[in-house]
Image: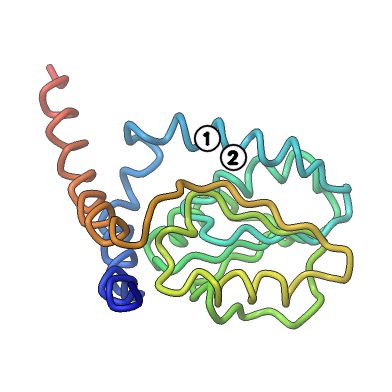
């Protein structure tokens, strides 16, 4: 059982390469509408205070940050993603927002001090992490005492993680084929 779990583990480079390739098309992909609905719902459930410090782990192109920004006007909105290209797309959405702090990094080693955030969220990312337990420990570490963590993810056995992430790599190509077919 342990050997199966080890074989199913991803390296950090696998999701990074996939999402780097997908970054420019991500907001227009076939999955994005569903992801947006879930992110909006998570933000509604969070209902952060106007001056809250909130972290989005695996922030991608920053859509969750955008939804949070409708409620958090005076606090800090931070986002972390392993993909430099995803962060680049997100930064273009927030060119003049000093309360938005976007970083490239690993969820297993968050670049913020302990007890820094009031709330944190992570949507559809946990299944990409090589060591989800370490990522969760880091999320808890950066939360203030009494802070809240909101997770939304797909759940499947470790033995399926690698094959499903491999299939995800095909998504940009599928999107391009669909887009080309629909083009005049």
**Pointer 2 residue:** 39
**Pointer 1 residue:** 36
Image marks 2 and 1: residues in contact by CB distance under 8 Å: yes
Front-lying residue, 50 or 89: 50
Q: Split into 4 quadrants, where in the image is the N terminus? A: bottom left
Front-lying residue, 103 or 137: 137
- Residue count near mark 2 (Cα–Cα under 10 Å), binned few <14, some 14–19, many ≥20: many
- Residue 93 position within the rendered picture, expressed as x and y whole percent measured from the top left: 54, 48
- Residue count near mark 1 (Cα–Cα under 10 Å), binned few <14, some 14–19, many ≥20: some
Q: Is residue 170 left or right of residue 1?
A: left
Q: Residue at x 88, y 54 (%)?
A: 51
Label at residue 118: none
Question: At numbered mark 1, what does the secondary structure look like: helix, strand or loop?
Answer: helix
- Residue 150 position within the rendered picture, expressed as x and y whole percent measured from the top left: 68, 51
Q: Is 66 rendered above or below residue 53?
A: above
Q: Residue at x 51, y 59 (%)?
A: 58
Q: Is residue 63 left or right of residue 22?
A: right
The number of numbered badges drawn on the structure is 2
Q: How is the image coloured?
A: rainbow
Question: At numbered mark 2, what does the secondary structure look like: helix, strand or loop?
Answer: helix
Front-lying residue, 27 or 13: 13
Q: Residue at x 43, y 54 (%)?
A: 89
- Residue 8 position within the rendered picture, expressed as x and y whole percent measured from the top left: 29, 68
Q: Is residue 30 left or right of residue 33?
A: left
Q: Split into 4 quadrants, where in the image is the C terminus? A: top left
Q: Residue furthest front?
A: 1
């Amino acid at each position: 059982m342990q050997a199966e779990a080890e074989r199913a583990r991803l390296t950090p480079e696998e999701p990074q390469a996939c999402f780097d390739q997908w970054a420019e098309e991500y907001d227009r992909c076939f999955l994005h509408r569903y992801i947006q609905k879930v992110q909006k719902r998570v933000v509604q459930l969070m209902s952060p205070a106007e001056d809250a410090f909130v972290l989005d782990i695996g922030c991608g192109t920053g859509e969750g940050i955008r939804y949070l920004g409708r409620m958090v006007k005076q606090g800090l909105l931070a986002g972390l993603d392993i993909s430099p290209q995803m962060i680049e797309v997100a930064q273009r959405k927030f060119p003049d927002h000093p309360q938005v702090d976007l970083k490239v990094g690993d969820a297993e080693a968050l670049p913020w001090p302990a007890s820094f955030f009031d709330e944190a969220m992570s949507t559809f990312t946990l299944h990409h992490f090589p060591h989800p337990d370490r990522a969760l420990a880091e999320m808890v570490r950066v939360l203030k005492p009494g802070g809240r963590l909101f997770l939304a993810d797909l759940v499947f056995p470790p033995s399926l993680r690698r094959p499903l992430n491999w299939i995800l790599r095909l998504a940009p190509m599928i999107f391009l084929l669909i887009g080309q077919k629909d083009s005049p």
